[in-house]
Image: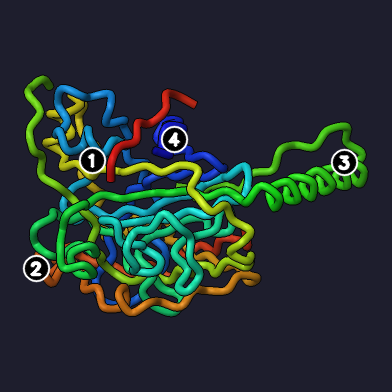
Amino acid sequence: MTGTSVRIDGNTLRLPGGAAVRFVRTLRLPETGTHPLPPGLGEFPVRRVSDYPDTVPEQWRARGGVMLPVYLREAMWLSFGSTTEPAALQVGVGKVCAVSGKPWSDRLSRDPQNYVVLPRQPWLDGINSGKGTVRQFVAVPLGLGATVEGQVTGEEVWGGVQLQSFPLAEGRLAEWREAQRRLRSVSRSAMGYGAAAPMAMAAPAAPAGAPRSAPAMGLGVGGSMRQEVYRDDRPLSDWADTPAGRVFVHLVTPPEWRRITGEAPPPSPVDRAAYTNAGLPWFDYYDQDAEDLAPTDPLEDVKPVGDWLGDDHEPWQPPGSHQVKELGDAPGKPVQDGDW
């Protein structure tokens, strides 16, 4: 098993090799049109499955990992925040790769690419679905066929989100560290400082009872937004052959969250029309030096959750151009892993 060194720091998952992942609540987009990046509306709370052995389903205990509460049709995005060293991160939705649409693998691949590169990729709001666009992650129950897993594989077995990190290979990591040391040395000399401040990439703003089976949740897709999934500019041989850490993220309905943890779930998501009418910001992000990955056939064909759950009747007020902000070119106990 590889996940014994994954840790929760607040609501951030820290995987070995420098990958840091937060799950961020956001506005659900309409399922037609292409939109700016929606805002962050706070983090989902994250808890270790192993801390609730008497109330989590037995299957969850076997898989280990962490859990977080989501409402039906609630949208989320993954923030990769700052990292200490380069990392390749695989993101699975029901053990389907959110980047390539291929089955989950313990190996990195480039044709098609099945990972994102940190810290270049600051976040991921959905599956890689079109040139320069993604389809938003939206929570739905298993059993309807609405999840990405159900549409790509024809089955809904796993649900949840899977994360797996790969560091640079030993020799490449040593070269990267030496280059960073030289860069800091040059910076200190040029600025006349005795010590350089550490550099980090800014994150975007933004009950008792016997164990039983719990309603299983997975991720389907909602509206389209402008976001690139960047191509790796390193050769595949630069990365380690095996992952340094992995974690299974279970998605829990709010009633089950309360039953399992004894905690109140977060309030229901904010109304998006009210958000836009209040003049609050949406976002656009561009990296002129990065190349976007082309979408793959399995993910291009995934249909939005509205095809299963009905039309989205939540009112939609498009943001004005003045509301779209352009973003620049830019510890705890281990989480227990299991069999998945």
Of labels 3 and 4, earlier in sequence is 4
The amino acid beneath tag 3 is Arg
- Residue denoted by label 1: 69
- Given contact means CB atoms under 8 Å apart, are the residues at marks 1 and 3 in contact? no
**Residue 189: x and y, percent?**
92, 43
Counting residues from the start of the chain, the first of labels 1 and 3 encountered is 1
Q: Which of label 3 and label 4 is nearer to you?
A: 4
Which is nearer the N-term, disc 1 or disc 2? 1
| Relative depth, front residue between 250 and 134 | 250
In the picture provided, is 78 more to the left or to the right than 82?
left
**Residue at image mark 2:** 310
Indicate the position of residue 56 as horizontal and vertical percent values: 17, 31
Q: Residue at x 20, y 26 (%)?
A: 261
| Disc 2 secondary structure class | loop
Looking at the image, is mark 2 or mark 4 earlier in the sequence?
A: 4
Q: Is residue 205 above or below residue 98?
A: above
The kind of secondary structure element at disc 1 is: strand
Which disc number belongs to residue 188?
3
Question: Can you see residue 110?
Answer: yes
User: For the residues carrying marks 1 and 2, which lies nearer the camera in this image?
Assistant: 1
Secondary structure of residue under mark 4: loop
